[in-house]
Amino acid sequence: MITLMRGSALAVSAIVSKAVLSGCRAVVRFGIAILLASCASYGPYHGNSASAPSNSIRGPADGRYKLAFIEFGDQGSELDPSQRAAALDVIRRAPRPLLIVYIRGWQNNANSGDVCRFEHFIDTLSTYPEAVGRKVNVIGVYIAWRGKDVTLPVAKFLTFWNRKSTGGQIAAANGCLAAISELALAARAPDKTFHHCLLLGHSFGGLVLENTLSHSILDVSGTGARNTSPWDMAVLFNPADSAVTTRQLMAELDHLYKYDPARRGYVSRAPGAGSGSFVIENRPFLVMLQSENDSATGQVFPIGTGLFNIVDLRAHWDRVLVPGSNGENISEREFYTLTPGNEPYLVNFHVVPRGEAAPPAGLRATQNRALEANILQDHPDYTFYTSEHNDGHADPYCRDGNYNPDAFRSTTGKKFGVGGSLFIPATPGCLAGSSACRRTSSGNTAAYGVITPLRC
């Protein structure tokens, strides 16, 4: 039999407590070490230097396209101002620029696999017969930010709130809009014999782009006329922002413009408005495209914003006007919780399939031929061609995130694709691709959907 004295018991307890505490400290240190090791690099990933002044520019030896990088930090500051200068130099040297500015979103940085896919996209554009025949200078600018903050497989999904907030901070700062505007203005300089500028944003990149451009769209000149944006069109793919900003933008545009059927466009409501106050109907300020099966914006975003509302103890919501609804007011929580493309009050088009389509005559491209078909045939009835489902044909050109512009180009388009049309739900829209306006529509019913010109 062993007799344990009280003093000995206390000593054993102290030893056990120290052992437990030491073990907890070790676990905490190990966890911190894993988190630190899994943090994404701050960059810049493509910084320039005296020995490599054009490190932020790359492209094939034959010069058929150029890809430039401009990287921003979490506070919206450029990480390397020389990157913008290098991109501007490329644009200024190009006599016939087709400029495509792209902002990627969550889980992507300036060295992610998405860079490779974007480079493959602009490379494909540069090889189209229309681009080659017109001697177009295809230039892509990848605007990067730390969409990927943590690389740990599970922990990276917990960065939703942090990265959403960072995207808003970058859009609120001056640097991103200043860079986009300067790039677009350089592309349309008076000495250019051809120029087009397209802005693209995806996911949280769509959040950055929409919030960056909204103030520019509503800007006015000293004469009272609306300023003309230096870019030709802005397109957002599955934008991961609350629909609050979009609703506000649509409400402002509805307040500022009205549809003129004689001119087939939108004119300013201001009395005596002159030039700069007319927008043709097929050139919207902003287009938003939303896929119905995108889980990030359709499922993750509402859950993430809902949890934030609980933690933030947000109980009161104002009632706001639905644009073009003749006075209907609903809780702003509806717009805060959903993204623009998933908000029924703001959606004005649905793309519906019309079956397989035979390729039109005269196509010369070997990849993604639906794009060439749409370039050659501008359908007035809102019908367009689509490519086959992505079969991963871009993957062979990417190795460890690096793109090989000299790889062999296999032919795609084993099945040409399907014809598509834009189907009009209850609320057709006007100046942007996500809006709600007074319902006045006309047209005919086709076999595979409704082909309806929009009026609002």
Image (spheres, rainbow, N blue to C red):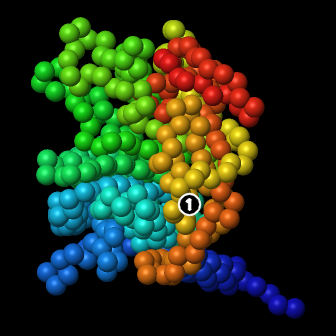
Q: Which element is circle 1 on? A: loop
Using the image as rendered, state which of residue 37 and residue 88 is in the foreground.
88
Q: Residue furthest bottom?
A: 1
Q: Is residue 161 left or right of residue 393?
A: left
Residue 63: quadrant of the picture = bottom left
* Residue 106 rendering spot, x and y as whole percentages: 49, 57
Using the image as rendered, state which of residue 305 and residue 62 is in the foreground.
62
Q: Is residue 129 left or right of residue 269?
A: right
Q: Assign the N terminus to one quadrant of the image.
A: bottom right
The residue positioned 13% from the left and 52% from the top of the image is: 191
* Residue 11 rendering spot, x and y as whole percentages: 63, 83
Q: Is residue 186 above or below residue 344?
A: below
Residue 67: quadrant of the picture = bottom left
Q: Is residue 99 above or below residue 299?
A: below
Q: Is residue 62 left or right of residue 163?
A: left
* Residue 202 rendering spot, x and y as whole percentages: 48, 51
Q: For mark 1, does the 10 Å Cα neighbourhood hold few (<14), some (14 to 19), or many (20 or more) residues?
A: many
Q: Residue furthest front?
A: 361
The residue positioned 37% from the left and 48% from the top of the image is: 199
Q: Is residue 225 above or below residue 231?
A: above
* Residue 350 rendering spot, x and y as whole percentages: 63, 34
Residue 7: quadrant of the picture = bottom right
Residue denoted by label 1? 368
The residue positioned 41% from the left and 50% from the top of the image is: 200
